[in-house]
């Protein structure tokens, strides 16, 4: 009797085990836990690209992602690092407790002397020669106040002090910089001076980011989110009361916020939240008791990271992109919103998952538009599809009142 090979069984067993392990690492909405070489709390994350990402945290922790793995980096400090930002992959700054200002030149990290013994919480710049760090200083009596330091490419200097505690900074340009802090503090820099802004809240603000100078989000305690439209700040409904700490978006219609709260009802304890803004409202996309998140950053809408306690790094990678193909029957053209399809000659385009694409058919002179077919569309109005798979749509044109019987297939390679 011929013996049956165990290879297919073992292969399926390994495949099943691998799939289950991957599933165990994933939470809601495609957020999955990354393997990291530390269990220390991570406070901040920033990258120059999808293959060059830095995360910083407790006790000199600096991690780097090269597109394949996270690895630890050596630094010249044993203090906590609270903020990280770079001009490029060879010009990166990290800040932290008690005059901790570090610089990475693409090879190694080194300490920068400032002469100030302040606690720095965040860092941002318009270039490597125009960098701001924000934090707080202690007075002789033990009191604290906010401070802003500036680096001009050669040395750090004190730009502002004696104000309320400051926690986060983001800028649209060298002449349009925003800083947030305790009791609703928001400051704006116009390239020459710092001016206070009316935030409309007394809550402490922990993070700030914008898609432009006219579209800025600041987040803070008790679920506070305020938005700046270029003229004034207004409150937004977040749907939560947790303390929000970090904010980042790929655009004004795709913004993520992370935070932490305490749940008194069972199961009680601390839990973290990830919120998402789609341009019209905020929604909770993740609420988990096993993690504690502090910051969020992404290289694109399909590649977003969140960092927090116990060396936690979550990564959100959406499936896709998906290909939309247009087939023409008869004489006419089809265009799309968002752009990508202009058929002929461009009859195929790839779009991110959940992108809504609207197709419009225009008949050629002497022709008429008959109908859409396939792809879930019909009739003669515009065709709207949601990209959660590869989709093929046919637009049929004919002579005045006559539907053509021939088919022209015009497809391009995915972009």
Image (spheres, rainbow, N blue to C red):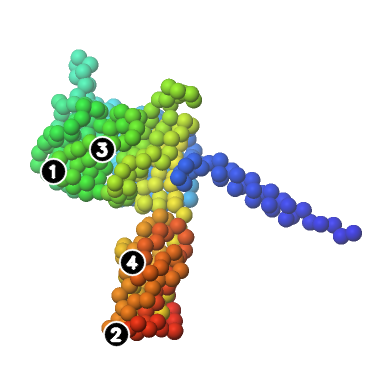
Asked if the residue at tag 3 contacts the one at tag 4, i.e. Cβ–Cβ closer than 8 Å, the answer is no
N-terminal label among 3 and 2: 3
Q: Residue at x 46, y 69 (%)?
A: 374
The number of callouts visible is: 4
N-terminal label among 1 and 2: 1
For residue 231, which numbered disc appears in the image?
Answer: 1
Q: Residue at x 39, y 39 (%)?
A: 284
Crowd around label 3: few <14 · some 14–19 · many ≥20 (10 Å): some
Residue 114 screen position, x and y as percent = 22, 33
Between marks 4 and 1 in the image, the one whose residue lies nearer the viewer? 4
Between marks 3 and 1 in the image, the one whose residue lies nearer the viewer? 3
As drawn, 26 above or below 408: above
Q: Secondary structure at mark 4?
A: loop
Return the residue at label 4. 382
Crowd around label 4: few <14 · some 14–19 · many ≥20 (10 Å): some
Crowd around label 2: few <14 · some 14–19 · many ≥20 (10 Å): few
As drawn, 386 above or below 163: below
Outermost front residue? 401
Residues under labels 3 and 1: Cα distance? 16 Å
N-terminal label among 3 and 1: 1
Asked if the residue at tag 2 contacts the one at tag 1, i.e. Cβ–Cβ closer than 8 Å, the answer is no
């Amino acid at each position: 009797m011929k013996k049956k090979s165990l290879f297919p069984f073992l292969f399926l067993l390994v495949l099943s085990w691998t799939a289950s392990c991957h599933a165990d690492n994933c939470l809601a909405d495609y957020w999955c836990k990354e393997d990291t070489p530390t269990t220390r709390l991570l406070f901040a994350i920033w990258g120059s690209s999808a293959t060059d990402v830095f995360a910083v945290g407790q006790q000199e922790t600096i991690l780097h992602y090269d597109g394949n793995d996270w690895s630890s980096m050596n630094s010249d400090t044993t203090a906590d690092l609270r903020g990280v930002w770079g001009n490029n992959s060879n010009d990166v700054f990290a800040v932290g407790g008690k005059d901790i200002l570090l610089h990475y030149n693409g090879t190694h990290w080194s300490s920068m002397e400032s002469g100030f013994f302040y606690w720095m919480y965040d860092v941002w710049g318009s270039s490597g020669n125009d960098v701001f760090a924000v934090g707080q200083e202690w007075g002789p009596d033990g009191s604290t106040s906010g401070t802003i330091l500036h680096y001009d490419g050669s040395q750090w200097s004190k730009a502002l002090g004696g104000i309320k505690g400051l926690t986060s900074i983001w800028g649209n340009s060298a002449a349009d910089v925003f800083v947030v802090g305790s009791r609703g503090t928001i400051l704006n820099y116009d390239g020459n001076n710092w001016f206070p802004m009316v935030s409309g809240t007394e809550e402490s603000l922990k993070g700030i980011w914008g898609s432009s100078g006219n579209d800025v989000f600041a987040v803070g305690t008790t679920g506070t989110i305020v938005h700046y439209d270029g003229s004034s700040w207004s409150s937004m409904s977040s749907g939560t009361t947790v303390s929000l700490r970090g904010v980042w978006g790929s655009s004004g219609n795709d913004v993520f916020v992370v935070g932490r709260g305490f749940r008194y009802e069972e199961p009680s304890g601390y839990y973290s939240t990830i919120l998402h803004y789609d341009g019209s409202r905020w929604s909770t996309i993740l609420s988990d008791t096993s993690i504690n998140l502090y910051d969020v950053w992404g290289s694109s809408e399909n590649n977003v990271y969140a960092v927090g306690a116990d060396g936690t790094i979550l990564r959100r990678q959406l499936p896709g992109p998906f290909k939309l193909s247009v087939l023409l029957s008869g004489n006419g053209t089809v265009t799309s919103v968002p752009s990508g399809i202009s058929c002929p000659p461009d009859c195929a385009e790839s779009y991110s998952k959940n992108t809504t694409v609207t197709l419009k058919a225009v008949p050629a002179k002497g022709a008429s538009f008959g109908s859409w077919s396939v792809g879930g569309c019909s009739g003669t109005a515009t065709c709207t599809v949601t990209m959660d798979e590869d989709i093929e749509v046919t637009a049929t044109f004919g002579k005045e009142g006559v539907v053509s019987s021939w088919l022209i297939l015009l497809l391009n390679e995915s972009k």
